[in-house]
Amino acid sequence: MAQRQGKQAKASAVGVIGLGIMGSAMSANLAKAGFAVFGYDPVAKARAALTKAGGTACESVAEVARNARFLVLSLPSEEALDQVCEELARARPKGLIAAETSTLPESAKTRAFERLAKANITLLDCPLSGTGAQAVNRDLAVYASGDSAAIAAFAPVFEGFARARYDVGGFGNGTRMKLVANLLVAIHNLSTAEAILMGARSGLDPALVVKVVADGAGGSRMFQVRGPVMVDRSWDKATMKVSTWQKDMRLINDMLQKTDTPAPLFAACMPIYNAAMALGHGGDDTAAVYSVLEHMMGVAPAKKKPRESRRS
C-alpha cells in the first residue's frame, strides 16, 4: 500500500529545470493546479522564487528527476540542454518523460533526444507559443511533438500551465511549427509599433488606438499583448528580451534558407531588431521596436505618462 501511494505521489509531481521568465511562470501555475513541483535553476534567486510560489527547490538536476516522473525543460541555450541531458543520463531515472519547451535548434533537440533515449528517457519536443506575460496567465499553446503515447501521458501537466496543446506529429515538428509562429510574431510585433506610431502622429490617443484596433480585423495577438506595452513605454519590464529574440530570429532565418522560402516581410523587419540591440535595448522587451522607429524619425523618446492620464 505504501509503495502504491509512493508511485501515485510521484505521478502527481512535476519537475521543472530552468526557472527563468517562462520556467518560473509554468512552475507557479503547476503549483496552483495542485501538482507537487520540484525545480532547479543555477540561480539562487530563481530557486527562492519557486519556494515562494509553493514549489520545492532542489540542488541539482538529478534531485529533481528523482522526485518526478514528468519533467519540463525551459533552458536558455543548446549548451544548457546538453549539460542537463548529461546529468539526466547519469541519474537514469526510471520511466521519466521530459518535455523540452525552449526555442532551440532542431539539431540540438535531436542530439538530446538520442542521448536520453540511450538512458531510457523519453524526450518530447514541445515549444511554447506565448510571451512571459502570457505564461503567467496560463495563456500558452504547446506545440507537442514526439511519441504520441508520451504526449498523452503528459497531457495533465500541459493543462496545468497552458490553455491549449497541439500534437503536431513526429519529434522536431514542434520546433518547426514554433518557427512558423515566430516568423509571424516578428512581423506582427513591428507592424504593431508602426500602426500605433502612425495613429499617435495623426493625433489619435495611442491607448484608444490599441483598444479599438485590437478588436477589429487589423488586430492580432501581438497587437493585444505588446500594444499596451508600447503605449505605456514599459518595455523595460521584459517578457521576451530583444537579446533572446535575436536567437529566435537567427533560427527562423536558418529555416528560411534551408527551405529556400522567400520572406520579404521577415527580411525587412530584421534590421529593426538589430537596431534595437545597437540602441541598448538588448535587455528590454521586444516592444522596444517602437523606440527604434522613433529614433529613425529623430524624435526624442517620450517619457512614461502617469497611468491615470491614459484611462478612457
Image (spheres, rainbow, N blue to C red):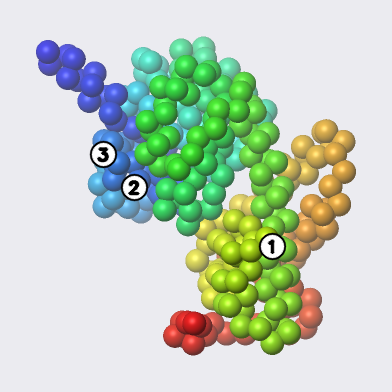
**Figure check: 224 above or below 166:** below
Q: What residue type is labelled 3?
A: Gly
Q: Distance between the residues labelled 2 and 1?
A: 34 Å
Q: Mark 2 points at which residue?
A: 28
Of callouts 3 and 2, the N-terminal one: 2
Q: Can residue 260 be seen in this view?
A: yes
Q: Is residue 6 left or right of residue 218?
A: left
Name the residue located 60 percent from the left edge and 28 percent from the top edge. 168
Q: Distance between the residues labelled 3 and 2?
A: 10 Å
Q: Is residue 228 left or right of residue 3?
A: right
Query: Any mark on residue 134, and which?
Result: none
Q: Can residue 233 be seen in this view?
A: no
Q: Name the residue under label 1.
A: 218
- Between 95 and 146, the residue placed more toward the observer is 146
Q: Is mark 3 on a helix, strand or loop?
A: loop
Q: Name the residue under label 3.
A: 34
Name the residue located 82 percent from the left edge and 33 percent from the top edge. 258
Name which quarter of the figure residue 103 lies in. top right
**Percent x, y of residue 114:** 58, 17
Name the residue located 23 percent from the left edge and 21 percent from the top edge. 8
Q: Is mark 2 on a helix, strand or loop?
A: helix
Q: Which amino acid does label 2 sit on?
A: Ala
Q: In the displayed image of the protein, which residue is found farthest to the front? A: 216
Camera-nearest label, 2 or 1: 1
